[in-house]
Amino acid sequence: MGSGGLGLFDQYADGASPKKGRKVGHSSTKTSRLRSQIIKVNCYLNGEADHGKAAVVKLPEECDTLGEVLPKIHKRLDLDKRIAYAAELFLPDGKKIRTYPELVDAAENDHAVIVTCGEAFDPTTVPYDLLEAYLHGGGRKAIVKVKQELEIKQKIAAHDKADTVRSDGHGVYPNSAAVVTSRSQTVESNREVGAQMRHEYMEQLMFRAEQQRSLTKLVQTSTQMRKMEHKASKARRKELEAERLEHIKLEKEQEREELLTKRAALAEKIKKKHNALQQSYKEHLALTLATKYKPPGSP
């Protein structure tokens, strides 16, 4: 033990060397400061507060203006996929948040923040519970107050209904005129509802039968037209095939005739050459024989 009876942990708790007269204790860290001073904003997209989920946006310590907050809300809501940009912030009653302190106050009171992208604020999509919680101050206490008021209103409504029933005579006398009238009215209303339901059901059956007939007729007409088109196409293809075969036959006959003509001309030419050669050979042979066997004394 040293330094006036202080231990080493007490002396070096603040990260510095011990000095006389200096306060000794644990110093705060950045994590502890963020944990105690972090700001969480519950954001809903305008027009989707009644069916969309809230996005919790955690604002860092360095944010101190709405201009720095809006890009973080834009990124957290992933508005790039919607081709939109976070432009304005509103409270559940339609009041616009214009300054950063107003946003911090809404976050501390757990108020819902409606994010718009330049369009008008839509009050019709703000749920009743969010609005009532905001009007009652926000936080868990506001939810408890709203729940208690709702229970009180339900009890008052139940008492008023019971008083009305008792004033009409229901429940006082089992066979009173009010009871008989109510029963008859209930039976009559049930009969009317049943008749209306049967009428609507028959109308639906007739409508579906008419649709079925029209669909069947349309299918039959389409099938007949398709068959006619197929038959006409088949006949047209048959005619084209006959024309093609006839044209091929004519071409073959024409080629055959040309080939026969060429063969006849070639045979005639060969015959002429052969006759000329034969005639020349005969003349040469006759001349040779006449020269070889010339009688004596002939000139």
Image (cartoon, helix red, strand yellow):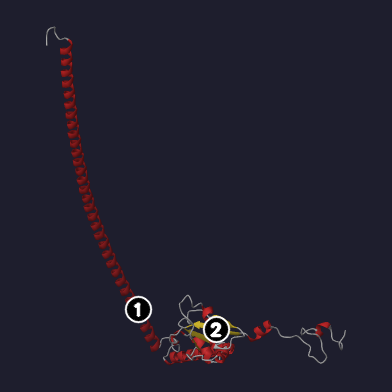
* Side (left or right) of 104 relative to 268: right
Q: Can you say whether 42 is above or below 254 in the image? A: below
Q: Position of residue 286 (x, y in %)?
A: 15, 15
- Report the residue marked by disc 1: 193
Nearest to the observer: residue 207 or residue 19: 19
Residue kind at label 1, given as amino acid type: Val
Q: Residues within 10 Å of mark 1 (few under 14, many from 20)?
A: few
Q: Residue furthest right?
A: 1
What mark, if any, has residue 10 been given in the picture? none
Q: Residue at x 18, y 29 (%)?
A: 269
Asked whether the viewer can see residue 182, the reply is yes
Residue appearing at x 25%, y 60% in the figure: 222
Could you tell me residue 14's position as x and y percent? 76, 85
Residue 151 seen in render: no
Kind of element beneath mark 1: helix
Earlier sequence position, callout 1 versus callout 2: 2
Mark 2 closeness class: few <14, some 14–19, many ≥20 residues within 10 Å: some
Q: Position of residue 261 (x, y in %)?
A: 17, 34
Q: Vertically, is 65 above or below 205?
A: below
Q: Which residue is mark 2?
A: 42
Front one among 46 and 223: 46
- 261, above or below 50, in the image: above
Tell which of 274 and 171 is nearer to you. 274
Q: Is residue 32 left or right of residue 55?
A: right
Corner quadrant of residue 227: bottom left
SS at mark 2?
strand
Residue 220's spot in the image, x, y percent?
25, 59
Q: Is residue 5 left or right of residue 193?
A: right
Q: Amino acid at mark 2?
A: Asn
